[in-house]
Image: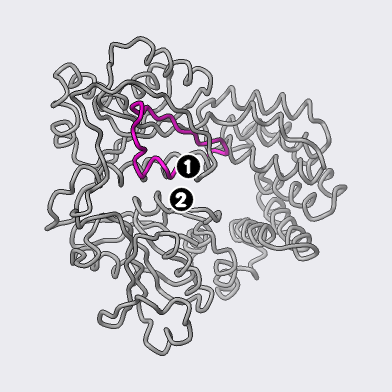
Amino acid sequence: MTPLIQIISLARTGNPARAWALFHSSGWDERGDDPKALTLKGRLLKDRAKAADGADRARLYGEAASAYAAAAGLEHDSYPLINAAALALLGGKPERARSLAQETLALLDSDPDQGENAYWREATRAEALLLLGDATGARAALTAGIAKLPYAWEDHAATIGQFELILAEQGKGAAWLDRHRPPSSLYFSGIIGLDEHDPEIAEDIDAIIAREKPGFGFGALAAGADILIAEALHKSGAELHIILPYPVARFRELSVAPFGDHWLARFDALIDVAARLEVLTELPHEEERSIGVAVELADLVAMGQCVRNAGVLKSRPKALTISGIGDAPRHQNLVWPDSGHDQFSISVARKAEHQSITAPSGEEANEIAGILWVDGLDSDGLAQLPEVTPAFHSVSDARYKISTNIAELLATSRSLLQHNVDHRISLLIDIMDRQRPAASLFELAGNMARASGGGAVLTDYKSAMILTLEPGGHAIEEIGELQTAYGPVPLWSLA
C-alpha cells in the first residue's frame, strides 16, 4: 500500500488524476475508519472538482464534502468540518453548508483548543460566518485572526483563496479581501553607473515603495541601482531575497568593488540582513560564465521567484527598474512587460565612465538554453509524434533536444505527456554552448528524468523559477531532492 504522504506529495505536483488513481489502487478510498485517509480523500476530490465542469464538478465537490464530514465525525475536528461546509456549498447544497457551518461555530465555542493556531481558529470562524451569510462577522473574525499572526502570509493566502471560491459561489463581490492580502512582491534591477548622490533618485525609489508597499524584494546587489533599491526596501520593512550570478566574494569583486569602496560596506550590510540568499553556481568543470549572460540568468530566476511568491501568497508581482536615459533595454528586461504584471521605471543620467552590462556578443558561444530530456523514448515512439520529432538527438536509450526557445520545449514536453503519461521527462535550463553542452548538464538532465514516475516534467530550482514566467498556469511544486555526484539538487515538478 502506497503511504499517504507519498500520495500527498504527488497531489502537490498538480496531477490530481494520477494522485487519485494511486489513492484508489492502494485501497485508501475504502478506509472509512481512518480520518487521515478521509481528509486526503476530500482534498483529492476537491482538486479533481476544480479541474472538472458542470455536473461533474458539483458531484465531485459533494463527494469531497462527504469525505471531510466523515473525517470530522471521527476526529471531532474543526478543520475537516469547515472544509465539508464550504464544499457542500460548492457542490450545490447551501442548506447543508449552513448546517455544517453552524456545527463548526458550536465546536469552536465549546473547545478552546480547536484550530492549529490562533490564526486558524479565527479564520475558521470567519469562514463559517461567511457561509452563514454574515459578511460583517466574517470580516471582523478574519481581521482578528490576522492580528494574532500578522506574518503568517501563506496561511492568510490559503484563507483568501478559499473565501474567493465561496464568494463566487454566493454571487458576491470579493474586493474587500484585497485589504487582507499579503503584501506584493517586487523584482528590482537597474544600472550600476548612476549618481548615487542625486536626491531625486532616492526620492523616486522611496515614493514608489511607499505607494506600492511591497513586503518582499527579489534581485541582486550590484553597486548602483540594486543597492539603492534594496536599501529602500529594507528600510521599509520588506524582506530581501537576494539572487547572485556568482558566489558572494566573486560577485563583490566583479560588481561592487570596482565602482568605489563606499559600496562595499553597503553591500555587506544588505547580505547580512537578507531573508534569503541564492547563488547560481556553475556545475563542475565549467569555466566561469561571462558576466552578461550570468546576470541575465540570475535576473530571470529573480523574476520567477517574485512571480511565484506573489502567486503562493495570492498577492501581486511587480517590478522596479532603473535604466540609463537612452539605453537599449537588456533582453531580460523585455521579459517582464510580456507578463502583463505592473512595472515601474526610473530613467536617470548614466555616468560617462560606466558602460552598461550587455548581453553576450555574437562571438559568445554560451547562452541561456534548455535541454528537454526524455528517458526511454525510442524511434517507434517518436514516429507516433511527428509534431515533436524534429531536432531530437539520441544518447543511450534516451532522446534530448536543446533550444533557446523555452516555450517551445515546454509545449513539446506537454505534448509528450498527453501522448503517454508515463514518459519520464526533464527540462533543464542553464547557460550552455548549444553545440557542445557540458557533460555535467547531460548527466543532471538524465538523472532528473530517471527520477520521474511519469505524469510530470522534473526540473531543478532555477529552471522551475524561470518556467514560472511562462504563460499557461502550470503547477510547479518542489517535491524533494535528487542525490547526485555533485551533491543534492532540489527537485521540482511541472504539471
Q: Is residue 143 left or right of residue 301?
A: right
Q: Is residue 249 above or below residue 202?
A: below
In magenta, the rendered stretch is 313-337
Q: Is residue 493 left or right of residue 114?
A: left
* CA distance separating discs 2 and 1: 7 Å
Residue type marked 2? Thr
Extreme front residue here?
A: 326
Question: Along the line of sight, which residue is nearer the eye, 427 or 121?
Answer: 427
- Disc 2 packing (10 Å; few <14; some 14–19; many ≥20): many
Q: Position of residue 253 (x, y in %)?
A: 13, 32
Looking at the rendered structure, the secondary structure element under dot 2 is: loop
The residue at 63%/38% (across/down) is 159
Pointer 1: what residue?
307
Q: Is residue 254 above or below residue 42?
A: above
The residue at 43%/16% (across/down) is 204
Do the residues under discs 2 and 1 have CB atoms within 8 angstroms? Answer: yes
Q: Is residue 51 above or below residue 87?
A: below
Pointer 2: what residue?
468
Q: Earlier in the sequence, mark 2 or mark 1?
A: 1
Is 334 colored magenta in this rendering? yes
- Coloring scheme of the render? one colour
- Disc 1 packing (10 Å; few <14; some 14–19; many ≥20): many
Extreme right residue here?
A: 95
Is 139 colored magenta in this rendering? no
Q: Position of residue 223 (x, y in %)?
A: 24, 25
